[in-house]
Amino acid sequence: MQIELQQIHKHFGKAHVLKGIDLKVDAGSIHGLVGENGAGKSTLMKILTGYLSRSGGRILLDGEEVECETPAAAAALGIGMLYQEPQDFPPLTVLDNFIVGRDTHPDNHRGRQQARLQNLADQVHFNLDGEAQLEQLTVGERQQLEFLRLLGRDARLLILDEPTTGISDRQKERLFAALHQIRDQGRTILLVSHKLEEVVALCDRVTILRHGEVSGEESAPFHIPRLLALMFDQSPATDAKPQRRAPGDALLWLRNLSASGERTGLHDCNCTIHQGEVVGLAGLSGSGQGLFLRLAAALVQPTAGEVEFHGRSLNRRDHRTMRRLGGCFLPANRLEEGLIAGFTLVDHFTLALRCSRREARAAAERAIDKFRIRGTPDSTADSLSGGNQQRLLLSLIPTGANMVLLENPTRGLDVESAGWVWRYLRKHYAGQGAIVFSSAELDEILAVADRVLVFFDGRVVRDLPMDRVDYQDVAAAMTGN
Amino acid sequence: SAEEVTFGMLLVGPHNDHGWSQAHYEGGRYVEEKVAGSKMIYIDKVNPADRPGLTIPMVVDDLVDKGATLIIGNSDDMKDGIREAAAQHPEIKFIHISGDDVLTGKAPANLSNLMGRMEYGKMMAGFVAGLTTNSGKVAYLGPLINEETRRLAVSSYLGARHAWTQVRGKPADQFRFKVSWIGFWFNIPGVTADPTQVARNFLDTGHDVVLSGIDTTEALIVADQRRKEGADVYALPYDFIGSCNSAPEACLGVPYFNWGPDYARIVRGLANGEWKQSWTWTNPNWADINDIDHSAIGFVPGAALSEENKAHLQAFIDDLGSGKLNLFSGPLNYQDGTPYLQAGEKASDKQIWYLKQLLEGMEGASK
Amino acid sequence: MPNLRQHLTDTLLILAIVLAFTALLLAIVGASPIEAFGHLFKGSFGSWSKFSRVLNVWIPLTLCSLGLLYAFRSGLWNIGVEGQMVLGAIGAAGVLRWGVDSGNPLLMLTLALLAGMLLAALWALLAGWLKTRGGVHEIFAGLGLNFVSMGIILWLIFGPWKRPGIASMSGTEPFPAALWFPTLEGWRVSPFALALTVLAIIITARVLNHSRFGLNLKAVGHNPRAVSLYGLSPQFYLLIGIIISGALAGLAGGLQVSGIYHRLIPAISSGYGYLGLLVVMLANFRLLPIPFIALFFAALNVGSIQLPMMMQLDSSLSGVIQGACVLSALLVFGLRKLKRGRNP
Amino acid sequence: MSDLSLTILLASVLATAAPLIIAALGETITEKVGVINLSLDGSLLLAAMVAFMVAYESGSFTLGFGAAALTGAVIALMIGVFGIYLGQLQVAVGFALTLMCKDLAYFLGNPYSRLQGPQLVAQPIPGLADLPFFGPLLFQQPLVVHLSLLLIPLVWWYFYRTGRGLELRAVGENPEAAYTRGIDPRRKQLFYTLVGGALVGIAGAAFSLGIKPGWGRPQGIEGLGWIALAIVIFGGWHPLKVALGALLFAFLQVVGITLQSLWPSVPAQVFQVAPFPLMILALLLVNLLQREGVQQWLRHRPGLALLVRQLQGRPPRALGQSFRPD
Ligand SMILES: Nc1ncnc2c1ncn2[C@@H]1O[C@H](COP(=O)(O)OP(=O)(O)OP(=O)(O)O)[C@@H](O)[C@H]1O
Ligand SMILES: Nc1ncnc2c1ncn2[C@@H]1O[C@H](COP(=O)(O)OP(=O)(O)OP(=O)(O)O)[C@@H](O)[C@H]1O
Ligand SMILES: [Mg+2]
Ligand SMILES: [Mg+2]
């Protein structure tokens, strides 16, 4: 099946996420879609399967315009998708999960379905127990099951959004072999991935998205540095980095730390953060950086190991202890975890500074001025644009903080503001303490950090001082090489 | 010269409850019919559960506003409220049904107490039950425990025991009389025992006649269900002359209140400017207890009562009326074995009114 | 002020739906809607004595609703107000029983209200604790505790606290008049209780809308995940919210005992807790409309007695109207939400 | 207890439990698909009134039961439209409906108070009724008892052995995922909410036409709706355990009366209120057992762990949340 998307637009409320995407996929090919976090890949695919509505644009299958208004309609057209976040039913059994749905074989005979499942699993050498509870499976195994479902359907177009999360290399090989086989049957595959070497190994053609726009299209054979260049903004070198100081005393210890959560969990992490350091956490999203920051902030309790801050163990403590000792955390999903929708700037300052409303208003005015927040003291947090929400969060960091943990701190900021923010953060917090931040943009990390921790699959795979960092090496480590 | 009297009636339950409140309501209607120029204004469901926030003095204010010069409160529960209202409206006359404020001296001068001697009705009900039971096991579905409910249960017991031992000549030790209290005048799920359940339980445990002491007719309905399923069981409802109607085939009869004559007497008196505070405990009209114009209480035999037993009942009523028979005569012991009446002693009104326990021979809680 | 206009149209719309629905019901039972509404109105605002009766309902209803507002602010559905009110009544009655002969009625009344608030707050804390620690949803914890409190009050009235010799629905022995909250001549409402309620409204307005505590509470209700970043403990505020909620319900219960019934009766809570939930929902969880809606509901409760007296209609019509108000409000708010969602 | 034969006791339990089982299973269906119908206490009452009214006027049980089912479904429809499609809090809608339906029942039912109406009685099934033990237990019961007993395996079978049942559970767990698989979760939710509501209506009719025949104020079933809701939780949203919960409650009620006469000193309220603290304790237990520490402790005690797993029930994940496709 040949797919053509024309001028697809998508707005989420005020956010313009897809800005006129054109995409053409040849029948019987494996087409790759790559781009940095938040580029709009998943959104585009969800529009194609009818899960999301589109704000504008046309979809053509084999030259004919189709609507794709619901997943059911898309399924009827022969489109099937493996979602990035597993769309399944953890409390049900594997077999139940395999059966349920109007998009597949309308046969509820458990014996026959079990046989089908077994048969499909054998084809790709997966190993799944039909009677197991799905929630006891790893995310990788859940993805495998979803993939088998998809395989078992007569879908002419298979969309795979990050299908290789958490599966072993052997299984990956089998999966790839199966994908080649499917392609050779004449079916079309759209593969969304961050992992460039997979894309390179599998795809016939690749489209690169950046900030909701198509930034390029390449055909095999691929040149990885070129793909990287199309994916990430090559921001002009930030002058935020002053003279590197020698790290001071240790502030934060993480010992044999493990925790569950996110996609991968965190496994056996050891490191020490010293005063004066600016540490960047690199890695694909959901590789454990978020969990690392939350563990350090005592927002999540470890399943094993220990966090120690200023010589005090944070196990069994909550964030308030951390905060009293000078810690501070800024989450990436600002409105869910950081700001309080419906609360004004003044409200936020009242909460954060524990002061009177008059003082809070003054503080809010100062912050608006200083951080160039486009809003008034009485604007509510949810009425601010994404970038301004981020500025508000930054302005709420207490002045005396000595351990600032930031998750994607400049997300949604333009390059110039980002530069200003980093100068500000360095000036005010790097001296009296340390800054630890994650970022989806490797360039930012390389530009700002004194030290880089590279995460892959829930593990810290590199811990490098800046002078030993090599762009290619880190990018490779991030993608599992 | 007679004045026109508007009287206000406070009914604790719904006016059409086929029970206690309806009996009062019909009494009021009787007055309207018989006493020229009289008019009733009633409010039913006067209880805090049904009418949150309503207190007796408030309702009385309202009725007085509407021109009532006599207020009748039909529930024991209104005791304090009526007394309070009476103190606030000295020019208005009050009747509290089933109360004892006049006896205890707490009542202001414009408050009287009125009650019918349902003890006789209950004796008749018990008597009929004792005549009819095959198993010798009679059950009493009681509401909550207080002096009034105790004396009614005891009266039933005395009547039933009399029928069993004296009329049928059976040994007293083969007779069982069981009382279960549901905890309230009607069912409140999650709070009271479920009367339907209790009645079933009675029948399941071999009792074949159930006397109801509560406001609603569960006992009769359950007995009727069981009859339709082939069991030979009966029940007697309480309070209202028409109570048997909801299941005539299972009904042995109903002891009922007939408030009309007393009410008419009082209203007529008021119309003529007469009022005397009194504590009145009215007897049935022994000549004809079912004489609607003269008897304060009555007993309607049910469709299920055999002709033979009807005759026994009539004789029993005659004996009670003539004074030949007084069931409240000693020797009688309380349930815990302490003496209630010595041999030959006859209970005074106060001894009956303030009955402290159930009697020896009855099963069930006294307190 | 597009906001004000929207509120106004919403209100009118809700009223129109309710009027139409009620008129339909009355037509079904063959009664004249005009007459019924007339009686409802005259029965509640027709005279001072009637109006004072409305106020007597308004007081506990408002107190419960205010309390509920605290719980809702912190994100909890405190359906247990009903039981908390009962416990408040029990606490107050306990103190008054104990202090019958103390010779210091003012002290006793104060103590009674405080004890009622304390006991109710503890009862609420139990529900809150079940929620935060035990993971038991507050609706079921609250409901279960409501039934338990019903069991306790009946047990007290028919057991340890029963009147000498008898136990009845009429409750415990009434307290001597010295232990009643005094009322003004011709009024049936205690000015003290009225003042207390107005005070509660003012304090609640200040606390919820103009204090840091209120802000913290609201923050927890809005986004429990974010507040820990501001150094607040969400659990603490949840508990505080429900405790205040309970204490206000307890105050209402205490006033019922000391100001209205002058004794403990089984139905002491009169369903005001549940009705309060409706009031708050109809107020769309805002403070300002609460006293007015509570007044409207109280008037319905009081005026509805005229229906059986004058028209032989069942007075449960008032409850139907109250429910219909909330449902049509939910409908109107829901449609508005839908419209907003469609064209942002 | 001595006077009471086991058969009769159990037969009585079955009869008492019948409407509760029907109502609780109805609510189980509703909640299993992710919707919470909190209006049970009012729905039961209104349906009971309508059933009595219709059966009284028409003399037909079928019409009575049908009208009650319709009543329950209409109330459920309000929950569905307000909660599922308009995105209002289902709990709020349900609660308002609870209070309103109750008053509506008394308002409209007033003229039918305490009339002698039709009532279902036990129909001994020829042949089977004379069996020892099982005869009186199962075959001398009113039809609603059979209905309730049939419904238990039926619901179980539907939930766990049919494709539609699987879809139902899937929607209740994760409507988004169901949506991605071509199911319209909102339509499913509305449909099963209506089915559940209709069953609740039938339970109401079972009261006023069978188990507690008649209509009046108080009807004597106020509060049972809350109990049914509690039983659903107690039963962990599993039809068999829910039915067991209803039977247990009925058993407590029936035996409570016997126990009361055995221990007259214990106030009657204790036995009546018992189910509620029991429900809270059950919920508490279920939640505490899911704690990491407890789970770890249990890992070394497989026997106990198995028992705990049986006890555990988890609400459908999407319970009470409204799903709205983009
Ligand atoms: N439901 C939503 N509401 C609002 N914004 C959304 C929503 N879903 C996605 N977005 C925003 O749209 C943008 C594109 O998201 P999308 O999930 O398509 O990115 P992606 O390219 O798949 O990223 P990743 O590699 O992290 O999966 C992001 O900025 C995201 O925050
Ligand atoms: N819900 C709202 N209510 C009121 N004003 C709003 C609302 N949402 C956004 N705004 C205002 O509209 C303007 C544009 O918002 P938008 O989110 O499009 O900004 P943006 O260009 O994306 O900015 P940024 O680069 O900071 O993300 C901003 O001034 C913002 O404060
Ligand atoms: Mg994505
Ligand atoms: Mg923006």
Image (tube, coloured by chain):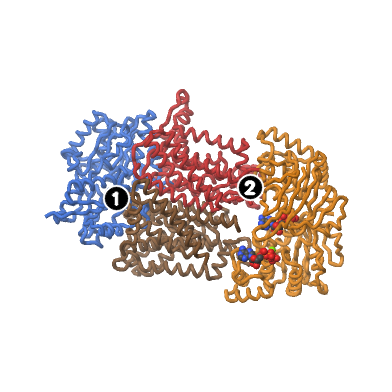
Q: Is residue D74 above or below residue A215?
A: above
B99 horizontally vs D204: left or right? left
In the picture shown, does residue B363 fall above or below D82? Answer: above
Outermost top residue: D127
Decide: few, some or many residues near mark 2? Use Cα within 10 Å; few <14, some 14-19, many ≥20.
many
Q: Mark 2 lies on which chain?
A: D
Q: Which of A283 and B96 is in front in this view?
A: A283
Q: Name the residue under label 2.
A: D174
Q: Residue B11 carries which label?
A: 1
In the image, the chain rendered in brown is C
The orange-tinted chain is A
Same chain for marks 1 and 2?
A: no
Q: In this view, does C333 lie to the left or right of A222?
A: left
Q: Which chain does the numbered disc 1 sit on?
A: B
Instruction: Identify the chain drawn in red.
Output: D
The kind of secondary structure element at disc 2 is: loop
Q: Is residue B193 visible?
A: yes
| Helix, strand or loop at mark 1 | loop
Task: Give the image quarter of residue B324.
Answer: top left
Q: Colour of chain B?
A: blue
Location of residue C24 in the rendering, given as x and y in whole percent from the top left corner = 40, 49
In the figure, B143 relative to A333: above or below? above
- Rendered view: C171 above or below B119: below
Q: Position of residue D134 (x, y in %)?
A: 48, 28
